[in-house]
Every structure is written in structure tokens, then in C-alpha cells.
Amino acid sequence: MLQDQNLQHQKKKELIIPKELTTALNKNKKAKEVFEKFPYSHKKEYIQWITETKTEETKTKRIATTIEWVSEGKGRNWKYERKK
């Protein structure tokens, strides 16, 4: 039983990318390439940040910011990451 639980934790939940984000990524080749190479956790953070919005205006702003940051290779919480 413990082994079954470990297998469940190892499986990552499939991320559902909002269609607005997909459209924006398709318009920016660099951002799309970087996003596709991002680790699961980085993608998940951006998707959650976008999907938790309450208004379309906020969602639109966050998608624009996401495209900007992703094209620069930045994770969602890049401000708090240690500088290498």
C-alpha cells in the first residue's frame, strides 16, 4: 500500500494551459520555446497565477507579464530566487 502511495505522488498532474496563454505563447516564438523547456513547477506557478484572477482585465495583464518574463527566461517568482 505504501508503494502505491509513493507512485501516486510521483505522477505529476497534467497541466491545463488556458487558451488565452496558449494564444499569447503562439504569438511569441521565444516565450513559447522557453515555456516549453521550463520545469513543471515553473509552468504550474504561471498557470495558477493566471487562472486565479477574478477579472478578465487582470487576466489579460498577467498574461502579458507572463509572456514578458518567460521570454526573458524568468520563473514566476524570479524576484525571490537566489542570484547565481
Image: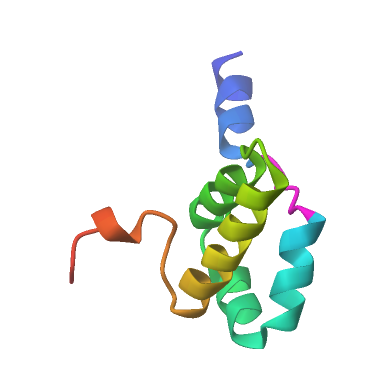
**What number of labels is visible?**
0
Q: In which quarter of the image is residue 34?
A: bottom right
Q: Please, which residue is most extreme toward the front here? A: 57
Quadrant of the image containing the N terminus: top right
> Which color scheme is applied?
rainbow
Q: Where is residue 42 in the image (x, y as percent from the top left)?
A: 49, 56
Q: Is residue 49 above or below residue 64?
A: above
Of residues 55 and 76, the one nearer the viewer is 55
Which quarter of the figure has residue 74?
bottom left
Provide residue 13's location: percent of width, then percent of height: 68, 40
Residue drawn where x is 52% and y is 48% of the image: 45
Residue 15 belongs to the span the image colors magenta = yes
Residue 40 is situated, as x and y percent measured from the top left of the image, at: 56, 54
Type of secondary structure dominating the magenta stretch: loop
Magenta residues, start to end: 13-18
In the image, is residue 80 above or below residue 52? Answer: below
Image quadrant where one finds the C terminus: bottom left
Where residue 79 sits, quadrant-wise, is bottom left
Relative to 51, 23 lies left or right: right
**Depicted 9 relative to depicted 80: above or below:** above
The spot of residue 37 in percent (x, y) is 57, 72
